[in-house]
Structures are given as structure tokens and as C-alpha cells.
Amino acid sequence: MIEVKNVTKRFGDFIALDDLNMHVERGAIYGLVGPNGAGKSTIIRHICGVYKQDSGEITIDGEKVFENESLKGKMAVIPDDIFFFTQANTLDMMKFYKNMYPNFDEQLFHKIAACFPAINMKKMIRTLSKGMQKQVAFMLAVASKPELMVLDEPVDGLDPVMRRQIWSLIMADVAEHGLTVLISSHNLRELEDVCDHVGIMNNGKILIERSLDDLQTSITKIQVAFENEIPKFPDNIEVLKQITNGRVHTLIVKGEPHAAETAISQLNPLLMDVLPLTLEEIFIYELGGENYAVKDFIF
Amino acid sequence: MQSKTSFFNKALFKKNLSRTWIVGVVYFIILLIILPIYYVLNTGNADNYIVQYGYNKEMAFLSQMDALPAAEFGFAVSIVVIVITFWYLFNRRDSYMIHSFPVSRKTLFCTGLLSSLIISITPVVLTAIIMTLLAASSGIYTFAAIWYWVFHTVVSTLICTSIALFAVMCSGQLITAICFYAIFNFLYSMMETSFRLVASRLMFGMAYISLFECSPLSPALYLREKCGVDTSIEYDNYGNISKFTTSYTGVKYLVIYLIVAAVIAILAFLLYKTKKNERVHDFITVSIFKPVFCVGVSFFVSMVLGTMASSTIASFGKYSYDTKYIMAILFALVIGVILFYATNMMIEKTLRVFDMKRGFHCAYYSIAALVIFLCLRFDAFGVESKVPDVKDIEWVGVQSEYTMTFTDPKEIAKIAELHKILIDDKKEIRNLEYFRQNEQATLLTIKYKLKNGKTVSRYYNMMDIESPFSTADYTAAAQPFLDYLNSPEIIKEHILGNIWNDCDVTNVYFEKIIQTENGNYVTYPAELDVTESERLAKNKRVYKALLKDIDNGRVLNTEFGQVAWDDSSALANQFEVTLENKNVEYFSDEQTFDEWEYYVPLYNRTITISLNPKCENTIKALTDEGYLDDVSEIVTRAYYYQ
């Protein structure tokens, strides 16, 4: 659905996006992760048609995004810093969205509103809490019945119940209408639960872009113990990180888990345990190679 | 394939109106107060004086329309409405969100423009409708005045709205956008005023030039000055209205501005199309304008400040023209470099602007500024040496001790020739100007009124050629001018006036001065106890004596040194003659020179003449005819003020 090809964006001398390529399939929930300043918000603003790239091409369903009214009518955006008109209440904003988005469903809006009973629809939005404002943004976005939803730090500031409520809304929309979702977040634990595809960004580039399953099988965490010194591993095993605690070694190994397990088992370990790797661990280990590892701090 | 986009979005339109309606309401209330309500109060309470002086309600109504602001309204309302409508361009969060909505910039721009114009123009039209009904109910049917005011206000609003849009697209900061709006409206006038200020301080013959001139390139000012409902009233000798005329001026300009407004709006739209959203909060969002702004501000401000600094220092001591000019250049260059980096800091929002690239730019700018200063110094543009072509001159005025206006082509050619002689000797006169400005100097003004309506004025500080500071070169430059101005025919024709040779002398006023016992002087007017015909005959004889003194070069001479008012020779006795010819209009050199707006035809003129002890014929005639009892009644100013 979203195709980003060789996109470069400069802010003065700073290269925010560096020949970036990205691909999001229709119906996917794509998590965009990366360290601060990686360029996540920048590429999201390009996909929303807010920024225009210096070079390269961004298309959605084959159409260029920038200045494309009909395409943007099929897209709902919730930025990290939400915007509402100063004097508007929720109903005013609903009327605005209704006139703005061709597929806006007022009945659906009221149905969703019932899930957020704490929100007073006639109260000016700017007087609501940050979390409540986010809830209003979600209500409006979902009621717009978009084909693509672009979310930048979407559940930041929401309490756990509301987080679940919102994710369930989105997941239901994905399941029922084939909604495509692009999410940028630092909350990797949460992304792991909802995303099926992940793109890891750093320095304006996508380092890795895969389905979460593929990603989780491309790196393996193995705990092994040997009777004596740790033997030399076969050449086909690339150890990204090794932590030794007595005779127990925790290895982060690049490659498919079964292959790694088979190779290491040939070294006759006393015990061997293959553990699932979290997205957060993948993120840390992948970016470790990009000079983004956690540094030891000495006072 | 790119989808089609529309020009209008209803949701945005409603939202824009919901933000700006209050401005429209306030505007409407102001218009109601100053138009229909004021009209009712003005004509309702003024019946007595209206009838007394020949006014009627229609005249009062038209005079009100004449005084009504139009361009001012357009100027003020446009920027307020535009910044409220396009508020999102100054806030990063709002800009990102608005541009992620399913609307193109074309839709945003056109919808914003439409809603702004509705808010700005509707109150004007509504007020005009109310005023039309009110006027009709009062029996006034000159509706053209109301609707021409509407046209004037609407065009002013359109041009100011388009400039406001352009300004808003040029900056990412609200305050800066408002400043840019003011700058764009007055840019040309400000630049011209800067040049005129520098010219008045540094250039030969430009000391008192007008610092401001209204130009079509400053629309708000030009629309105010040149367009609108104009009324003129003429009164008879009893103060009653004899003629009342109404005209609608500047239609041509309004039509031109209408077209210009459309062009600027299109330019603003093109800027918006290419505007980068990441430039929100930037001082200038259009890259090409950054160097223009830096260099423009640095050049004009440094030029003015450098000149002022140089003039201030020069006022504390006597510096030659060259020294003053060199000081001005040095100050301007130093201030220019400081401003160049200061504006760069402002634009880039950092103090780190001292790099090699900007260093070269600064050097180029400084060289260019220096070249322009040197061009002014050596009069590369021919401003100092400009003497208009004789065939283009309608009249030329010369003002020093007396004001003379020449309309005869031969006289015009002669003054232009004398002016060229002055300019050829400018080096000598220029340095005299700076060294001796306060010593026996008088200002010589030469003013050309051109046939195209423009005026060229030059000013020279001249000095008495008898002064000890006078040089041979200076005398050579000034003498031809003095010789011409002091020729008896010129004095009679231009100081006494065109009727000098065919007039009645209806009045001679002479003030006698008598010294009292305690040494004080007492003045009282001479009074003759004779019949009217005898008095006229006496007046005529005094006048003939005066003409004889003029022929002998004793009185009404130009000296360039204020000798006419010199305490040592001028008489303190006031002397006036009134000349009259009821069949020939008196040509007033002064009124023509001053381009007096309220011209009144004259058939008589009272001329004040500063006599001196050398006016033997006039003094004798005054004595013979009884205006003066004794020569002891005449006192020089030197004694009078002792």
C-alpha cells in the first residue's frame, strides 16, 4: 500500500532521511521503531503529505501523496502533538471531520463515544486532559473510516485500560475492514503485541524491515553451559553478543533458531535453552551494531 | 495519477468564518458609527448653520463622504483577518495537522481568501446599503458617492489582502508577518525616503528636499492620497458658498490596483505552493528573500544611520564637504557590516553566522554599498547637476529674500542657464555652504514646476558677495544670478507684480517713529486728512518715487546676505503699498511658487517694502505728500532695536 522509494530530506545541512526505502502492505500493522532523531516522525509527515521530499517518491496505492486530496481523505492521522481548534468541543470537531472526510460515519462515532464515557462531548477539548484529548482523536480517526491510519506515539499518555480500549478498536477495524496501520512508537513491548511488520530506523534509513515473525526468527537467544571453557563456535554462527555468568553463557546469535540450536548442540553443552527474543532486545542488539549500544557510565 | 482538487472546502470555510466573524462585526459597528450614525447626528443638529452659509444636506453628506477613510480600513482589516484565517502557518502543530487533512494547499488558500474577503467586504457593502436608504429617505440621490467609496474601500481591501497573504507566506512567525505586511506596503516609500534623507544631508542643492513622496508602489498610501470622493467649495466675498463640486478621483488607479491585487494574490499562492512546512517559526520561509532582506536592511539602514552619524559629528565642528562624506561612508560601511551579521543571526536563529561564505557575501555587499556611495558622491546619476529641459518647464520659481515666479519661456531659459552656472561652480559654493552656513547666508531656492505635474526643487546656501568670506570664484558664480534678479524690470514685474505699470495705488501705509523723552520709540501710522481722490493722487506720486528708486537699484534688491533686513541699513518704519487693477487679475508669484491649494483670484495686492536710507526718492515723496513730517521720524533698525 505505502511505497517509499529512495526518499531524501534535508533540513539545512542535516540529512533527516537518507535515501530511505520502505514498504507497507495493505492490511498490515506496521511498527516503525528507532532511536530518537532517527527520522520516524519525518517519514510519517511525508507519508501524511505534510512534508515534501527533496528527492525520491512516496506513493500510496500507486498515487503520489503530496497535495492529493482524495488520497488523504482515505487516511487518518494522529500525530504525537494533537491539534484541535481552540474553541471547539468534541461535537464541533466531529462536525468538522464529517465535512472533511468523505467516509465519516457519525453513527459509528457515537458508538465509539460510548466506549469513552468519561469524555464530555460539549466541553471544550482544550480543557480536557492530554489522555482524554488523545481519546477524542482516536474517536474521530476511527469514525473517519480510513483505509490507512498513521499514528505517531499513539497511546502515549493513556492509562492501561484506555490503551487496551484503543488497541482493541484498531484491531477490530483491521480485522473487519482491512485497515492498514502505520505506527511509530518507542513502546516496543506494546508494538510487539499489535504489529505484524516492523521497520527499524536509524540515521534516516530503514535498517531492517520484516514481518515480526521473520524478525524474531532472525535473531536467537540461547542460554548454554559447558563443562569447561566455552568452545569455539562454528563459522556459520554469528554471535552478536555474549554474556557470561559463571559457567552459563547467554548468546545472541544471528540466524534462524533451529539452525543455531543444531549447530551449538554439536558442541555438547551441559544444558542448552533457546529463548524467545523480545522486540526490545532485537532493537537493542540490531542498533548495537549501528553504534547505538548502551554505553557504560563511569562516575 | 494525481487526483483532482477543488478550490473550496465547506468545512474549512465555516471554520474560518467561525474564527473571524467577530472582526467583521466590530468592523461593521465602526462603519455604522462613522457613516449612517454620524450622518444623522451631523445633519440633524446642523440645520441652522447649514442654512446660514448656503450648505444643504447633500453638501454635508458629500463632505462626509469626502472625509471618510477607505484605504485605512482596507489596510487595517485585511491583515487582521488574514492572520486569523491563516493562523496555522505560524504554529508547527497546527500546520502539520491542517496539511494532513484531505485538503490541498489550493483549497486551503482559495477557501481562506474567500472567507477573508467576505468578512472584510460584507460590512462595507451592508453599511453602504443602509447609507443609501438613509440618504434616499433624506431626499439625497447622489448615491454614486457612497458606492464609489465602496469601490475604493473594496479595492483597498483587495490589494491589502493580497499583500497580507504574500507577507504571511514569506514568514513563519506571526509578528514578523505583520511587520513584513507593513514593510511591503510602504517599502518603496521607505527606500525613497532613505535616499532622500541621505541626499538632503550629503548632496549639493538637496538640503531641504521633501523627504516623502507618495508613490504608486506604496499602495496603502497612494490609495489614500490619490483616490476617493473629492469635494471642493468656493465662497463668495460674504463667506457664503458660491460653488460646490464633487469629483471621483483615481478610478484609473483603482482599476490598476485591482489587477495588481490579483497578480500579488497569485504570487502569494505560488509561494504557498512551494512553502515548506518545516519552515514554520522561521523568520523568512522563502530562501531567496533571505539575502534580499539581509542586504536590503543593511544597506538602507546603514546608509541613513551613517549619514546621520556623520551629520551629527559635523554639527559639532567645521568639516569640509569631503570630510563629512568620508565619515558618512565609513560609518555606513561599519554599521552595514554589523547589520548584515545581525540580520543573518535573526534569520538563522543562531549567533554562529561568522563563516567564510557569509564573509564573502558581506565583502561583496560592502563593496557594492561603497560603489553606490561613491556614485552619489560623484553624482553618477546626475541628480545634483539636473536642470530640467526648458521645454518641459511650466514655470520656475526663485526664492531668496523675495519670491519670484517666471512663466515666460525666455525668463525660464535664463533662470535655467543661471542655475547651470551655479552648478558648474558647485565645488566653491558647496564648501562655503558647510563652512559659512550661519554667517550672513540666505537660502536660495530654485523650483521648477514641470508640465507633467512634477516638481524639481534645489536649495543652495548663498552668501553676500560683500562678505569677507566670499571668494572670487564664489562671486563669479553668484554675481550673474544677482544681476538678473536685481534688474529693475524683474523687480517690478515679479515683486510689485504684473499690474505694476497699470494700476491704482489704493493705499499707502507708512509708520512714523518718534523717540520719546525717555528714549523709547513710539510708532503710529501716518494719516492724511484729504479727500479720496487727493489721497489716490498722493499715493500715485509716492509709488512713482518708489519706481524711480527701483530703477536706481536702491530698494527691493536681492543680496544673498539678508542685507534687506540688515539692522544697519533697513528702516524700522513699516511701508506698504496696495496696487489694484479691477480688470486684470493679479498674478501672485508667492501663491504660484507655494502651489497654494486654495487659489483665490486676486485683483489687488499689498506689498510690504523694506525701505532704507538710500531710497531718497521715496522718502522725499513720503515727506512731500504728508506721510512723513520730518526725516527724524525715520529710524534704521540698528537704532530702533538698540
Image: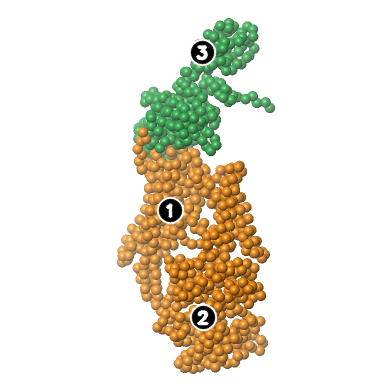
Chain colours: A green, B orange
Give the position of the N terminus of chain B as an image quadrant.
top left
**For mark 2, does the 10 Å Cα neighbourhood hold few (<14), some (14 to 19), or many (20 or more) residues?**
many
Mark 3 falls on what kind of element?
A: helix
Q: Which mark is residue B160?
A: 1
**Tag 3 and tag 1, C-beta contact below 8 Å:** no
Considering the image in quadrants, where does the C terminus of chain B appear?
A: bottom right
Distance between the alpha carbons at the discs numbered 2 and 1: 52 Å
Task: Name the residue type under label 3.
Answer: Pro
The chain to which mark 3 is attached is A
User: Which of B74/B389 is in front?
Assistant: B389
Tell me residue A125's x, y (percent): 45, 38
Chain ID, mark 2: B
Picture layout, residue A205 above or below residue B158 = above
Residue B75 badge: none
Q: Amino acid at mark 1?
A: Cys
Query: Disc number at residue A257?
Result: 3
Element type where label 1 sits in the image: helix
| Numbered disc 2: secondary structure | helix
Marks 3 and 2, how far apart at CA: 117 Å
Q: Is residue B608 visible?
A: no
